[in-house]
Image (tube, rainbow, N blue to C red):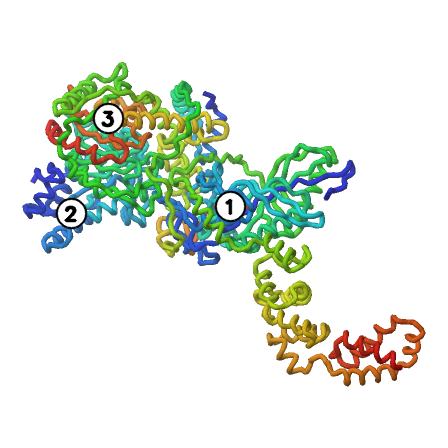
Amino acid sequence: MTDLVNLHISEALDLLNKKEISSVELTKAHLAEMEKARFLNAYITETPDRALADAAASDKRRANGEALGALDGIPIANKDLYCTKGIRTTAASKILSKFVPPYESTVSQKLKDAGTVMLGKVNTDQFAMGGSTVTSFFGVTKNPWADENGEYTLVPGGSSGGSAAAVSAGLCMGATGSDTGGSIRQPASFCGVTGIKPTYGRCSRYGIVAFASSLDQAGPMARSVKDCALMLHEMAGADQFDSTVAELPVPDYTAALTGDIRGKKIGIPREYRPDGLNAEVAKVWDKGIEFLKNAGAEVVDISLPHTKYALPVYYIIACAEASSNLSRYDGVRYTTRVDGKTLDEMYENTRTDGFGAEVSRRILLGTFVLSAGFYDAYYTRAQRVRRLIYNDFIEAFKNVDAILVPAAPTPALSYEAFKNMSPVDTYLGDVFTTPASLAGVPSLSLPIGLSDKGLPIGLQVIGSILTKTRFSKFLKYWKNRQDLI
Amino acid sequence: MYTIQGKTGDWELVIGLEVHCEILSESKVFSGASAKFGAEQNTQVSFIDAGFPGMLPKVNEKCIEQCVKTGFGLNAKINKFSRFDRKNYFYADLPQGYQISQLYYPIVGEGYIEVTTDEGTRKIGVERLHLEQDAAKSIHDMVPGKSLIDLNRSGVGLMEIVSKPDMHSPAEAGEYLRQLRAIVRALGTCDGNMDEGSMRCDVNVSVRKVGETALRARTEIKNVNSVRFVMQAIEYDAHRQIDIYESGGVCRQETRLFDSVNLETRPMRSKENANDYRYFPDPDLLPVNLTDEYIENIRKNLPELPEAKKKRYIAELGLTPYDAHVLTLDKETSAYFEAAIVGRDAKKVANWVMGDLFAYLNKNGKSITESPIKAIDLGALVGLIQDGTISGKIAKEVFEIMAETGKDPASIVEEKGLKQTTDTGAIEKIIADVLAANMDKVAEIKAGKDKLKGWFVGQIMKASQGKVNPALANQLLDKKLGEV
Amino acid sequence: MSFNEQTIKTIANLARLKFPQEQEEKFMQDINGILDWVEQLKEVDITGVEPLVSVSPRESAIRKDQVTDGGIQTELMANAPESVQGFYEVPRMVE
């Protein structure tokens, strides 16, 4: 039975359709694995009863020959940022620790409609703010990849660290993540799984707790490119509730995974190879370049000149938007409340108590960069530089089909290392992921190799906006590469 | 020019108004909840209006249209590109912690409203009109120590119309507001009901010595909710400011509240937290891009605006500017007037509407739409005078009966036998009787005291119970006097 | 950068947050560190560059004026820390 928790979604769908396994079996196997792996603290809320009921319903549909969703019977997990009707949704925060949404997010609804079975809600950095899943009010999630001593001392990355850890450890077959500045791609790299941050506007943000609205994007995390493609096909698409979602048909991503990348031009931006780049990461990157050359792609040097400014631009914009997005958590309608004599006192008591240090720090920074006298110097300037970063990609994609860069500057770090870092040092973990976020271009992170200590290292394949078909063609190739890990 | 005479000289006023108009639409500006007034608490609220996690706004096309229409009413530039910004502050009536508004790129730019006062007609500049969402309502007296929040109004579309500091007297400000109300009512973009709060006004006032060009510190008077209060608030605060200056003090920029009971302004309890709204473009909403076709289509289908109507009344119907102004102040009145004048003398109808009808309605606390006298019947009444069926005097009597019974004037005249006598024989008989009874006065007329003729006409009317056509009576009186 | 004791108090107050002094100082340090790091953006020539507000692939989005929502008072109140008769309850806002 242990096999069942190591299947890819595509494989499990085959077995389900051949009636060799049932969704209930698949679900039970995962529930059992979740129980064994509780020490990882990947889940904030487990929903076994609902999962088993949904699995049974799926099996019944299949047995009766009724219409099936594209992912019918597949057990998945949702990042605890996705509002799920009737199931507590916390954003890994104290302030929302009692919030039971009376509505479902568009993306989780679409996955439900596709027949998936939700096992529970997985951990994240509080309000998705962090790259470690260390800031969760519900405790840290551990990376299922052990350190050289066989101990679980490593962070899973973040903010979708619960999703990455759960997928990696076989606690679900796929999971939703969300990516604002690298929150899908960096934990995917740390945990050796695949994740896609789609083009901004591909997936609806409706019902997903907002961090930074101009950057937030929902995306899938799974154990193969094909699995991610299957999930994304269900998650993406127009939504009447989100004004920023593309009103375009969703292409058949899996059909585009032909594996043929001969003649494709792959850009290697020189700015991603600064002095002092981690040698193991550089090695894996070179390996990736070799793979592509061998498969017949043309590898070209390119320049994305404003890359180094992406990180500070990102922190200004993301924090500014967050400071406003998080104003609604005020103790009046659905959060915890800490009383006060006056309205303002109640606000202060509730918010100070309800937000963790990292969230407070970002709210303070964001409030500051928007405040009178500083708005132009920080916020407007950041938006202008953002355009230059965006233009870099536009220029680059005139000449290349995709860009290959590392997903994270290092393999997974230890909690010890993480604890002693300054905020700026922790922010540097997003150095390779924020440019694509700011430009809104799609980017996929997938594991390519292992470090000397045997930890996974991922690379990002960045595509041009909404050219997923062209982009995906090239990705089929990677499917087999994942067998490395 | 309006000035206030102080101890140290004459002062002039500088006034600007910021008017919030709730947009007439079925649903709210960013959600599908109803925008209607007066429902049970928190029943016209979506999770969007309540600022729940992950909720996103989406613009109501009707609200855009209403802004563009109003923009035309203000003779203003319609901006093809506009965008939404967030205005950030904490308050219990603001569930998102920010109000979605338009600071940097409003949907409507500069325009003007023509305002007529005793001092003549002036164009008062409009700075901008922007689209934003209304706040919720709080109730303070139901539970001791608590305030209660009703989000029904949260997210209703608002147009904020900001004037330039172009007004210089309370009368001008009052007229501006009346005219603005007439415009939004004519366009159907806001019901203009200040007492229900669907139209609210903030007043900016400062004073300066006549001849000064620089502006002095201004007072912002919040939420003044009637035209009369606006005028009173300005009057009061201008005097207050002048008193400060003249006693050697200096006014500072401040926000005050108008106390409509004591007719004075009071400082708002100074908030310990200075506001810094941290406006920035709302990343949840895309810009509004209007095409030329869209704008032109709205322009083509605009109803006639009060200003145009007024000009038409003067030019085509021969009304005085004052009458035309009064009759175009709201669209119900002008609609009534226009229904009444079909086939009648418009000037005479105007007199009846503004005279007897307004007096009756005022006395009985009725609006023109509640008038028991139908427009067509008032027109018919004027018609009966015009064709000589009844005299003006009898008409007043008929009017009273119409107001009481709602009957049409012709049947009232018929029933009560109020028709004017045109039988010359009968009239001559009456005249003969009157002359015979007053031979002394006849002698005086003969001696050249022509003025007494009027007195005789009066006697004839009285004797005939008003049923004699006065012109005819005059004519026949001359004839009879000649015979005597 | 001049993010001093006064700034942190003002900013925290705008954000309705309130920290003990020790924590305030820590935040002040952190934020000063971040702002120093952000200074590098001053190197970039942004002359004539329009701010990039959104990377959404859409032009605009509007909806029809229809009532499609509301009538959910119970659901609205379900998570409220304090409510009475379908109202949200907060500390008294006026004297």
Position above or below: B167 against B40: above
Name the secondary structure under disc 1: loop
Residue pictured at 51% horizontal, 45% vertical:
C93
Q: Residue type at mark 3: give it.
A: Val
> Can you identify the residue that label 2 sits on?
A72
Give the residue displayed 16% in from the left and 25% down from the top: A297
Q: Quick one: which residue is furthest to the top in this view?
A: A275
* Residue at left offset 46%, top offset 46%: B295
Query: Could you tell whether B461 is left or right of C3 in the image?
Result: right
Which amino acid type is shown beneath numbered disc 1?
Met
Q: Chain of mark 3?
A: A
Q: Are marks 1 and 3 on the same chain?
A: no
Crowding at dot 3, Cα within 10 Å, few <14 / some 14-19 / many 20+, comes out as many
Residue A230 percent across, percent down from the top left: 18, 40
* Viewer-nearest residue: B38 or A24: B38
**Percent from the top left, x then y, of residue B449?**
91, 71
